[in-house]
Image: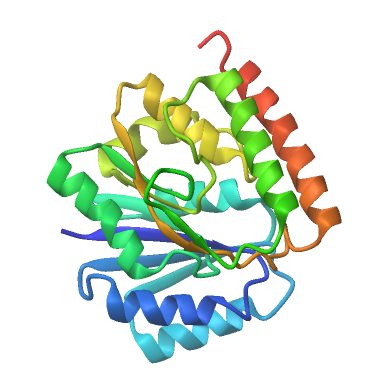
């Protein structure tokens, strides 16, 4: 069985190599393809990924989009994926191969259509969280998501998700959101299509120095944009 993992990357030159090393060596070697989709990078991410391919081998391939958000990068990667299981992973390595393997097990052993890592489900653990404000905004985002979509999951935004290929094929044509709120649209479309997605408790390492969430100002701006995106998603699909 081939597993496809899409890694969207925006200015991740300092962190993506470690993630690639760990997943090539420790996550089902020989059964995994890693698809890095660079989206509008202004740093040396491409050079880092090219060097990784030379040193780690053909399990990695990459695409370089000049513009676009995280949602667009994942969407593009899903189109290129060839695996029977297709998912995505944050480039910063917050989710280890050991934790991502739990998603595979949930799908194959418990017969779910998809599995998402959760930082809020009982049994999960967050290591190194430094920002109470980030926790507050996460809880606020969850509340708004619950009110608008009634999704049966607590943590829509954890950057580790995996689905059977048929789920991706079914919902991909209807995905519209290009930025960070795309997770909600993806899960909502999967629910509406009748797929069963489970939430798996995860050990997650906070690496909040990313381009989008690093500073308080960036966090507040990103949070506002995501709230507005939720409203847009809800109305885009209102009569469908």
Residue 118: x and y in percent read: 44, 47
- Is residue 161 at least partly visible in the picture? yes
Q: Position of residue 98 (x, y in %)?
A: 31, 67
The location of residue 30, given as percent across then percent down, is: 20, 74
Query: Is residue 12 placed above or below 232 in the rendered structure?
Result: below
Query: Which quarter of the picture shows residue 196?
Result: top left
Residue at x 42% of width, y 27% of height: 152
Residue occupying the point 67% across, 81% down:
44
Using residue 77 as the reference point, say whether residue 221 is left or right of it. Answer: right
Q: Residue at x 57, y 46 (%)?
A: 71
Q: Position of residue 93 (x, y in %)?
A: 49, 70
Q: Is residue 113 above or below residue 55?
A: above
Q: Residue at x 34, y 31 (%)?
A: 170
Residue 60 horizontal side relative to residue 219, left or right: left
- Colour scheme in the image? rainbow
Depth order, front residue of 200/38? 200
Q: Residue furthest right?
A: 217
Name the outermost residue toward the top: 239
Residue 83 visible in image: no
Indicate the quadrant containing the N terminus: top left, top right, bottom left or bottom right. Answer: bottom left
Q: Is residue 164 above or below residue 70?
A: above
């Amino acid at each position: 069985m081939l597993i496809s993992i899409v890694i969207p990357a925006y200015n991740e030159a300092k962190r993506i190599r470690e993630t690639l090393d760990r997943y090539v060596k420790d996550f089902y070697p020989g059964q995994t393809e890693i698809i890095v989709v660079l989206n509008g990078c202004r740093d040396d991410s491409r050079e880092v990924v090219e060097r990784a391919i030379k040193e780690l081998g053909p399990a990695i391939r990459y695409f370089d989009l000049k513009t676009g958000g995280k949602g667009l990068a994942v969407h593009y990667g899903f189109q290129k994926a060839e695996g029977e299981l297709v998912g995505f992973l944050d480039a910063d390595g917050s989710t280890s191969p050991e934790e991502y393997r739990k998603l595979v097990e949930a799908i194959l052993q418990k017969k779910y259509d998809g599995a998402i890592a959760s930082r809020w489900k009982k049994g999960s653990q967050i290591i190194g969280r430094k920002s109470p404000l980030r926790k507050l905004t996460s809880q606020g985002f969850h509340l708004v998501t619950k009110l608008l979509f009634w999704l049966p999951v607590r943590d829509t935004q954890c950057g580790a998700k995996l689905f059977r290929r048929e789920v991706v094929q079914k919902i991909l044509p209807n995905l519209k959101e290009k930025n960070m709120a795309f997770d909600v649209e993806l899960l909502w479309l999967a629910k509406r299509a009748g797929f069963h997605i489970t939430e798996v408790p995860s050990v997650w390492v906070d690496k909040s120095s990313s381009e989008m969430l690093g500073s308080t100002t960036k966090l507040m701006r990103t949070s506002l944009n995501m709230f507005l995106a939720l409203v847009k998603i809800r109305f885009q699909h209102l009569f469908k």
